Amino acid sequence: MTHEFVTNLVWFIPLPPVIAFALIVLFTNKSKVLSHTVAISAAFLSWLGAMIVFWNAIKVEHFAEEPFASSINWLPTGDTWLKIGVLIDPLSATVLFFVAWTVLMIFLYSVGYHNFGQPAGDHDHAGLPPHGATVTDDLGHKHTVLSIEPMYSRFFAFISLFAFGMLTLVVSDNILTLFVGWEIMGLCSYLLIGFWYGKESARNAAIKAFMTTRIGDVFMLLGIAFLYSVTGTLSFREIFTEEILHTLASVPSGVFGLSAAGLIGLLLFIGTVGKSAQFPLHVWLPDAMEGPTPVSAMIHAATMVSAGVYAVIRMFPIISLDEKTMTVVAFIGAFTALFAATIAVAQNDIKRVLAYSTISQLGFMIAALGIHAYVAAVFHLVTHAFFKALLFLGSGSVIHGMEHGVLHTGNHKVDPQDMFNMGGLRKKMPITFWTFLIGGFALSGFPIVTAGFWSKDEILADAFGHGHTLIFATLAFAAFLTAFYTMRQITLTFLGEPRTQEAEHAHETPWTMTAPLVVLSFFAVTYGWVGIPEHFPLLGGLVPNWFHEFVGSTLHEHPEALEFNIIPLLTSLVVALGGLGLGWLVYRNVNSPAEDKLQFSYSRTNTTSMRFTTSFSSSLPTGSRRMSSTSSWIKA
C-alpha cells in the first residue's frame, strides 16, 4: 500500500464508532440485535484500519522521519490558518494497536455481560440493573434467570462515542483536537459511570468523576492557551522542532522560576493528574466502579486513564525541558504508585481492588516519565492496557457467575462482588480462572513469562540505572504490594472451597465473555517479548528489542539502552515472587473479614462494642445485581 493511501486511511479510523453512535441513537435503538451489530461492526472496522496502519508503519524504515501525516486548514487566524490533521508516528502507532484490540474485545464482551438472548426482567426498570426474570421449564418448574439490560442499545451507543473520542485523541496531529477527543471521553465517562442513574450512588459517582476531571482539564486548557501564545502553533510536528523547543526552554514564565516549557508542562500535567487519577485528583476513579464492568475496562485500561498518560508522553519533549517540572512529575507518580497500592491490599470488592491497582500502575508510568524513562513508560502503558482490561473483564465474568448463584438461591443479601462470598471458583469457572490468573501474574510481574514483568522491570532498571534511588525503592515496595494484593484476590476468589451457596452454584459465562478473555490473555503474555532488553542474561538478543528501537525513535535523541544490572532484576524477582507467595500464605485459610489481619474492629468496653464501618457505595435495591457492599471494615 502506498504511503498516501495509508495516510488517508488514518482519517477514517475514528469515524465508524461515531457513525454507529448516530445510527443507534436515531434508528436502531428499538432493536437490540441491530444496535450491538452496528456497534461491533464499527469497532471491527476501526480495528481493521488500525491494524493496516500499524502493519504499514512497522514496515517503513526510519518511520519517525517519514510518519503518516496529513493536515487541512481549519480556522483562519489572520494571515495564517489553524490546521488540524492526523499523525501516526511510532508512538501513536503503538498506542493505536492496543486501543483497537482492547476496544473490540470490550464491545464483544458487552453482548454477554448485558445478557443478550435472555428474557426481559419481571420488574426491571430503565436506569436500574436487571433484577432477573422468572421462566418455566418443560416440566412446569419455575426458575429465576438473568434478565437482559433494559437500556441495552443505549449502552452500545455510549461506548461507541467513547471509542470515537479515544481514537480521535490518538490520531490527532495537534493538541487541540487531542483535547476535543479528551473532552468527549470526559462526557462519556459521566454518561457511563452513571449509566444506572436510578441508583443514587451511581449518579453521585458520575458527578464526582465529571467534576474532578474538569479541575484538571481547566489547567490543561490554560496550558494549551499558553503554548499557543508562545509558539503560535498547536501542531506537534511544528512544536517539537529544535528552534521552538529552545525558545520554550529559554523564555521565563515568571511563575515559580519555571521556564515557559516548565509551566506549560506543569499545566498539561495537571490535566493528566485529573484524567489518569493521580494524587490528589485520584478520588473519582474507585467510585467509577458504579458503572457496568465493560465501562470499568474502557476507563481503566483502553481509553480514559490511558489517555492521560498518553498526553504526558506525547508532550514529553516539552515537559522534559524543565527539571523542576520533571521532579514534580516523578514525585506525584511514585507517591501515587505506593499509596494506592496500600489501599488496594484491604479492599473486599473484586472491582475496587483493580480500581486502586490501576491508580497505582498509572503512578508507575508517570514516575517513569519523571525520570526520563520514556520507552519504559510507553511499554508499561501498552502491557498494562492488555492485562488490566483482561482483569476487569475477568472480574465482570466472576460477578456474572456469582449473580447466577444469587438468583439460584434467592438470597439477594449476598453481595456478588465481595470476594469473601466467593472461593473455589476455579472449578466452576475454569476459563475465567486461567485467564484471570494470567492477568494477575502479569500485573504482579511474574518473571519471564508475563508481559508485566518486562515492562515493570524496565522501569525499575531505569530508576536504578540513573541514580534515582528513592524512586526505585518506592516503586519496588509498591510492586511488592501489587503482587501481594493480586494473590490475595486470586486466593479469595478462586482457590479453596466455596464459602457460600451462591459460589457453589456459580457457573462459567457465555463465549462472548470468555473469548475476549482468551485473546487478551494472549497479549498479556506475548507482548512482553517485543521488549526484552538486549543485555538480559540468556534471553537478550534472541528476540530483537523491537519496542525500544521503534518507540525510542519518536524522540529527536534516541534513548540509549541501559547496561544490564543484576540489582534491579533481583529486586523484580524478589518483590514479584515474594509478594505472590506471601499473599497465598496469608490468605489460603482466611474465610471471613474477621480473620483478615488487614481489617479490624475497635471495642471500647466489654459491654459496648463499636465497629467503625465505612460505605464506599450505597446498596442497590433488594434483588438487584451488581450490588455494592453495604459496609466495609476500616482499613488498617
Image: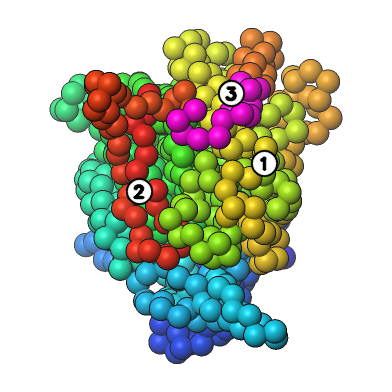
Q: Going by the image, does 170 lie left or right of 198?
A: right
**Badge 1 element:** loop
- The residue at 42%/65% (across/down) is 624
Q: Nearer the viewer, mark 3 or mark 1?
A: 1
| Residue 630: mark | 2
For the residue marked with disc 1, what is the amino acid?
Glu
Question: Residue extending furthest front?
Answer: 607
First to last magenta residue range:
580-595
Describe the element under mark 2 as helix, strand or loop: loop
- Residue 238 inside the magenta-drawn segment: no
Residue for point 59% across, 79% down = 142
Q: How many marks?
A: 3
Q: Does 312 sit above or below residue 323?
A: below
- Residue 524 in sight: no
Of the numbered discs 3 and 2, the one sitting upstream in the chain is 3
Can you identify the residue that label 1 sits on? 497
Query: In which quadrant is the N terminus drawn?
Result: bottom right
Q: Earlier in the sequence, mark 3 or mark 1?
A: 1
Residue 88 screen position, x and y as percent: 55, 54
User: Which residue is tagged 3?
Assistant: 586
